[in-house]
Image: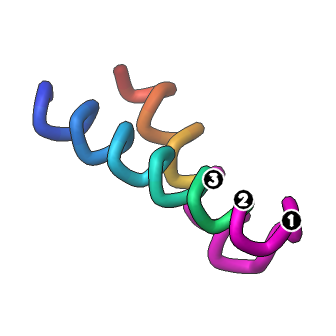
Amino acid sequence: MSDSIENALKLLNELEKLKRGSIWKITKSDLMIIQFLLNLYKIL
């Protein structure tokens, strides 16, 4: 379960980099990552 949390944190870091690089444009992949994280936290 700690692996899932670690992966989620890595995804969040990548998301922050993407947002900074593109001036906060939300892409379809960002939405998919956000949805994945929400589902992950529901499981936890």
Q: Which residue is mark 1?
A: 23
Disc 2: CA contacts within 10 A as few (<14), some (14-19) or many (>=20)? few
Tag 2 secondary structure: helix
- Residue kind at label 2, given as amino acid type: Arg
38 up-or-down from 44: above or below: below
Which of the numbered marks, if any, corresponds to residue 35?
Answer: 3
* 19 horizontally vs 7: left or right: right
Query: Where residue 14 is drawn, which disc sits there?
Result: none
- Which residue is at a point 50% across and 45% down the rendered structure image? 12
Q: Secondary structure at mark 3?
A: helix
Badge 1: few (under 14), some or many (20 or more) residues near its Cα, within 10 Å?
few
Element carrying mark 1: loop
**Three-letter amino acid code at disc 1?**
Ile
**Which image quarter holds the N terminus?**
top left
Q: Nearer the viewer, residue 9 or 41?
A: 9
Q: CA distance from mark 1 to mark 2?
A: 5 Å
- Tell me the residue that label 2 is attached to: 20
Residue bounds of the magenta highlight = 20-34
5 on left or right of 26: left
**Disc 1, disc 2: CB below 8 Å?**
yes
Give, as a three-letter code, the residue at label 3.
Answer: Gln
Q: CA distance from mark 3 to mark 1?
A: 21 Å
* Residue situated in front as seen by the camera: 36 or 23: 23
- Compared across the picture, whether 43 is left or right of 3 comes to right
Q: Tell which tag, 3 or 2, sits nearer the viewer.
A: 2
Identify the main secondary structure in magenta.
helix
Quarter that holds the C terminus:
top left
Residue 9 forms part of the magenta stretch: no
